[in-house]
Image (cartoon, rainbow, N blue to C red):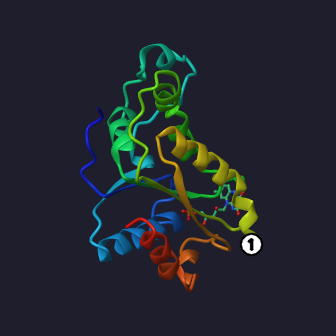
Amino acid sequence: MPAAASSDVLIISGAHRKGGNTDILTEHIAAALARHSLSHTDIILREKDIRPCTACLSCERDNNCVITDDMQALYPLLESSRVVVLVTPLYFFSMSSLMKIFIDRCQMLYARRFIHKAGSDTRGRTGIIVSLGATRKKKRFIGVTLTADFFFRTIGIRKMRTLYFTKVEKRGDIDTVKDIDKRIERVIDGIK
Ligand SMILES: Cc1cc2nc3c(=O)[nH]c(=O)nc-3n(C[C@H](O)[C@H](O)[C@H](O)COP(=O)(O)O)c2cc1C
């Protein structure tokens, strides 16, 4: 059994720009969780040493990843957190590379669940994918949605909520979104 998560919500940020829109949005999410008395653990991927998957596939044999970096401490959190939130800027209509490298390293959890049949419990857990970009079209988040859906299934989460913000480009643009806190509240209401 993986170690139990000590927080109600695990937030993982794929922001590259310090103090940018994704960081500001993450602060809004944290404030909303606090208003609902929900604790959270924040993982800022740019501050972590997480190396790309080398496709060695030893996880299919050993039910573990051979790369000894900060990902090792995240695996148990990913398996045990009731709510997992991914926050990423839109890069080439996909997730940021920081987020994608992190997700690729979850191939180990894929092997654990679907090959070794040893994944954690799937019941009562929710995944939330949050993204923002300069685009004016919500449909442009289709790449982010597909990747997030498969990621959440891989870590044992079947229920996914989406929260996407358009027309957010320059640093601070996110704070011009009028209904930002209302939209975050609506998603958090669904996880309680
Ligand atoms: C490398 C790169 C690729 C980007 N690709 C897209 C894109 O495909 N679609 C889009 O709408 N915005 C794109 N953007 C704009 C960012 O999503 C937008 O500026 C966002 O607000 C950045 O978030 P940040 O302030 O947290 O860095 C891109 C920005 C960068 C730096």
Counting from the top left corner in percent of width and height, residue 167 is at 68, 74
Counting from the top left corner in percent of width and height, residue 174 is at 55, 75
Horizontal side of residue 39 vs 163, given as left or right: left
Image quadrant assignment for residue 3: top left
Q: For disc 1, does the CB lie below 8 Å from ligand 1?
A: no
Identify the residue at image location x=39%, y=43%.
78
State the residue in front, 144 or 19. 144
Hey, what amino acid is under mark 1? Arg
Q: Quick check: 149 above or below 171?
A: above
Count residues near mark 1 (Cα–Cα under 10 Å), then give few for <14, some for 14-19, many for 20+: few
Total marks shown come to: 1
Identify the residue at image location x=50%, y=52%.
14
For label 1, the residue is: 136
- Location of the N terminus (image quadrant): top left
Q: Quick check: 43 above or below 52?
A: below
Q: Residue furthest bottom?
A: 178
Q: Residue furthest front?
A: 123
Image quadrant assignment for residue 178: bottom right
State the residue in front, 7 or 68. 7
Per the image, label 1 sits on a secondary structure element best described as: loop
Identify the residue at image location x=71%, y=68%.
138
Counting from the top left corner in percent of width and height, residue 173 is at 58, 76
Image quadrant assignment for residue 37: bottom left
Horizontal side of residue 31 vs 54, given as left or right: left
- Location of the C terminus (image quadrant): bottom left
Counting from the top left corner in percent of width and height, residue 92 is at 71, 52
- Quadrant assignment for ligand 1: bottom right
State the residue in front, 28 or 118. 118
